[in-house]
Image: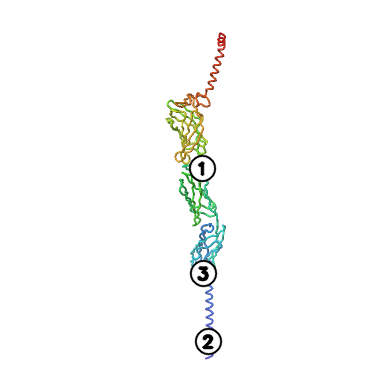
């Protein structure tokens, strides 16, 4: 019996040992299978997209890096400790992702990092990395550009001088030499004693390597400076720049310059007709040009006013004016016109009919300031017409000669010579009779 009892004990020990070994083997296989399954699931998680804003950083500027992962597997995967590895790109909100995050099957998980970029300018390749729950990590290389160049802004088109209360156009040019886009560009002009239209201008975006011209209409009322304040965004970062335009007041070198010449005055009985040519000796065209006479002359019909219309630079047009006056020694001719911006101008040419020259006083109306100019014109009569008048002092009849406004006085030398010649002929014809008379004496 003792031998039988000992045999059963040995068999029981062997059975317990076999059971323990089987259990251990089962546990080992289960653990290995679980580990292998988790690693397989993590391998099906990958970075589906990455976005960097702004696309190009300024040095020390703050931006956002957004990385999205996608789980293509059939089980959830735990992710932890996301990071961006670089000695030039630094994460500001690193503590945001301290906890374990799970990404389900067919789902996405997005990490957003606030970062700053160190100088110098260049292209850097930081590495995004995130650890999985059962070991191993997911890596994804990024590319970040840093550019220290700023936008360039200047007034590209402006007159040499501005005129008081006259509207001129200028263009503000903005150039983006950077590789990345800038957005929300706002231009606000400011100055003292100046009207600017529009009061501000907005441009939604300007791509890298491109430029834009923004037109403004400027009307100065005093000499001052006009400042264009430019603000724009690179990502969420705002930048500013100022452009100063001095409003130097002076003579408008491009203005139209009317010159009157080939003047002729003809008597019409109770009135007179003034005919002549008006030439535009300026650089720009004169629009809506109209001529009339000024005081003391009085404009009468049929040509109280004479409309030229548009007179191009270096072009001329003939005109006729009818008027009445008690003094023809000087006839004022008033010429008015507009420029392409609608500014009104006028010039008064005082035509001195006693000489070949005339002087003019230039004045402005509307948005044009006063200035003084001069011009030459010749005065003549046609067909022996009446050129004088009460108080005219210009002679009675105007005929022949290069200076017809002088009347008969300009022919005194010729008349005197004619009288001498006639007297000489008469003496020659009567010489015998004269000699006989002298002998009798």
Foreground tag (1 vs 3): 1
In the rendered image of this protein, does residue 428 appear above or below residue 39? above
Residue 337 can be seen, yes or no: no
The residue identified by callout 3 is 133
Q: Quadrant of the C terminus?
A: top right
Q: Earlier in the sequence, mark 2 or mark 1?
A: 2
* N-term-proximal mark, 3 vs 2: 2
Residue at left offset 55%, top offset 55%: 148
The residue at which mark 1 appears reads as: 161
Residue 249 seen anywhere in this rendered image of the structure? yes
Residue 112 x %, y %: 50, 62
> At numbered mark 2, what does the secondary structure look like: helix, strand or loop?
helix
The local secondary structure at tag 3 comes to: loop
Q: Position of residue 367 (x, y in %)?
A: 45, 41
Few, some or many C-alpha atoms within 10 Å of disc 2 (few <14, some 14-19, many ≥20)?
Answer: few
Looking at the picture, tell me which residue is in the foreground, 72 or 254: 254
Relative to 404, say whether 165 is above or below: below
Disc marking residue 9? 2
């Amino acid at each position: 019996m003792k031998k039988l009892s000992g045999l059963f004990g040995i068999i029981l020990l062997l059975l317990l040992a076999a059971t323990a070994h089987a259990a251990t083997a089962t546990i080992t296989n289960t653990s290995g299978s679980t580990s292998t399954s988790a690693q397989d699931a993590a391998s099906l998680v990958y970075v589906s997209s990455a976005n960097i804003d702004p696309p190009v950083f300024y040095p020390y500027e703050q931006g956002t890096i957004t990385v999205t992962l996608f789980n293509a597997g059939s089980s959830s995967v735990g992710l932890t400790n996301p990071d961006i590895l670089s000695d030039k790109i630094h994460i500001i909100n690193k503590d945001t992702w301290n906890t374990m995050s799970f990404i389900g099957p067919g789902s996405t998980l997005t990490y957003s990092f606030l970062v700053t970029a160190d100088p110098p300018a260049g292209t850097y390749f930081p590495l995004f990395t995130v650890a999985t729950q059962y070991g191993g990590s997911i890596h994804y290389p990024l590319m970040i550009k840093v550019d220290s160049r700023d936008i360039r802004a200047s007034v590209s088109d402006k007159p040499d001088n501005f005129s008081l209360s006259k509207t001129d156009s200028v263009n503000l040019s903005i150039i983006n030499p950077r590789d990345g886009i800038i957005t929300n560009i706002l231009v606000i002009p400011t100055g003292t004693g100046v009207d600017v239209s529009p009061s501000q201008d907005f441009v939604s975006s300007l791509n890298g390597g491109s430029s834009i011209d923004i037109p403004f209409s400027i009307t100065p009322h005093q000499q001052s400076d006009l400042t264009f304040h430019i603000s724009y965004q690179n990502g969420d970062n705002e930048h500013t720049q100022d452009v100063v335009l001095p409003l130097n007041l002076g003579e408008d070198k491009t203005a139209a310059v009317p010159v009157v010449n080939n003047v002729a005055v003809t008597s019409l009985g109770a009135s007179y007709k003034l005919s002549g040519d008006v030439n535009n000796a300026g650089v720009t065209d004169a629009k809506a040009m109209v001529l009339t006479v000024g005081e003391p002359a009085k404009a009468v019909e049929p040509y109280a006013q004479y409309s030229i219309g548009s007179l191009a630079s270096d072009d001329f047009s003939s005109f006729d004016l009818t008027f009445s006056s008690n003094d023809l020694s000087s006839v004022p001719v008033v010429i008015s016109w507009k420029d392409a911006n609608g500014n009104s101008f006028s010039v008064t040419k005082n035509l001195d009919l006693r000489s070949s020259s005339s002087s003019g006083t230039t004045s402005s109306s509307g948005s044009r300031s006063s200035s003084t100019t001069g011009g030459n014109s010749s005065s003549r009569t046609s067909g022996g017409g009446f050129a004088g008048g009460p108080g005219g002092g210009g002679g009675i009849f105007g005929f022949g000669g290069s200076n017809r406004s002088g009347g008969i006085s300009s022919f005194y030398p010729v008349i005197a010579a004619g009288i001498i010649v006639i007297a000489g002929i008469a003496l020659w014809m009567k010489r015998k009779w004269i000699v006989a008379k002298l002998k009798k004496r």
